[in-house]
Amino acid sequence: MTRQQLVGQIRQKQSFLCVGLDSEITKLPAHLLSDPDPVFAFNKAIIDATKDYCVSYKINTAFYEALGVKGWIALEKTVNYIGSDHFKIADAKRGDIGNTSDQYAKAFFEALPFDAVTVAPYMGEDSVKPFLQHAGKWAIVLGLTSNKGAADFELQPAGDGLLYEQVLKTVSRWGTPENTMFVVGATQADSIINIRKLTPDHFYLVPGLGAQGGSLKEISEKAMNRDCGLLVNASRAIIFASAGVDFAEKAGKVAKEYQKEMSLYLSGLF
């Protein structure tokens, strides 16, 4: 999906919501566990209930890889079921030497129809570049994350600023706002004005909404650009809104509430 197509979806749906399919099997509603593929059955119901309110889905591959072959089958069925009208993110946090990254890019962009992959930039340019060489595909590079461990490296002094600032400035030169996004945690709202100054035209994938305590209002006010420039992710708050037979209905209700709030912040932008 190109940037123009993504912005078109945001404009059409008046939403910049990304639904995270962190479909941990131990948290699925009990009545689904007898299904031959409970993870896909769960995902399919969540997608059907939320697709009108979001523009993106983020599949955290860890919850699928942990299930072995069955998990990969569920992942493939899920990404194919989502279709082409939603921006599909493989939250895989890949990043290795060039020829290995090239294979990772082929795995998610050719063998599987994802639009984007999250990438760790620690190993440098040759570990990120292969993800930027596929037309209409995106690398979503870790910038400033929400986890406690961000203080160990990301917030340490480096050069004339902090390490995450060096990452943003350097990676911005490797790609363009048409194929590169950054992960910016929703709990890092105090830093996001500075981040937007460093990368004024890029999109951000913003996790940490809902269960992690991030503020949609604050992020929207401080980080939105002329194209919106945000994909705000909510996972547990939506997909595990209920553990009962009404799980999909409740998920749709929460997604709709997020969409309604997002439409307020988008008013006047488009």
Image: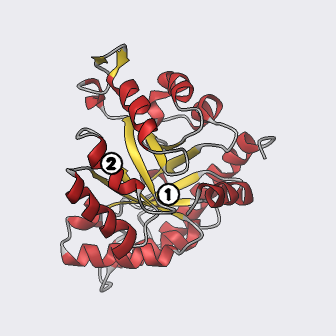
| Earlier residue among tags 1 and 2 | 1
SS class, disc 1: strand
Q: Counting other residues with Cα less than 10 Å from the Cα at mark 1, is it few (<14), some (14-19), or many (20 or more)?
A: many
Labels 1, 2: front one: 2
Q: Depth check: 175 or 80 in front? A: 175
**Residue 14 seen anywhere in this rendered image of the structure:** yes
| Residue sitting at x 36%, y 59% | 22
Q: Which residue, given by chain and number where applicable, does mark 2 sit on?
A: 128
| Residue sitting at x 25%, y 38% | 122
In the rendered image, the residue lying farthest to the bottom is: 36
Q: Residue 205, position in %: x, y?
A: 48, 45
**Residue 213 seen anywhere in this rendered image of the structure:** no
SS class, disc 2: helix
Q: Is residue 253 left or right of residue 205?
A: right
Q: Residue 66, position in %: x, y?
A: 20, 64
- Quadrant in which residue 200 is drawn: top right
Instruction: Establish if 138 lies above or below 29.
Output: above
Q: Which residue, given by chain and number where applicable, does mark 1 sit on?
A: 19
- Quadrant in which residue 177 is drawn: top right
Q: Depth check: 137 or 153 in front? A: 137
Contact between marks 1 and 2 (CB within 8 A): the answer is no
**Mark 2 belongs to which amino acid?**
Val
Q: Depth check: 250 or 42 in front? A: 42
Q: Please identify the quadrant where the N terminus is shown.
A: bottom right
| Residue sitting at x 30%, y 42% | 125
Coloring scheme of the render? secondary structure
Real-space CA distance between mark 1 and mark 2, rounded to the nearest whole angstrom: 25 Å
**Mark 1 belongs to which amino acid?**
Val
Instruction: Establish if 267 lies above or below 239.
Output: above
Q: Residue 12, position in %: x, y?
A: 73, 60
| Residue sitting at x 52%, y 22% | 194
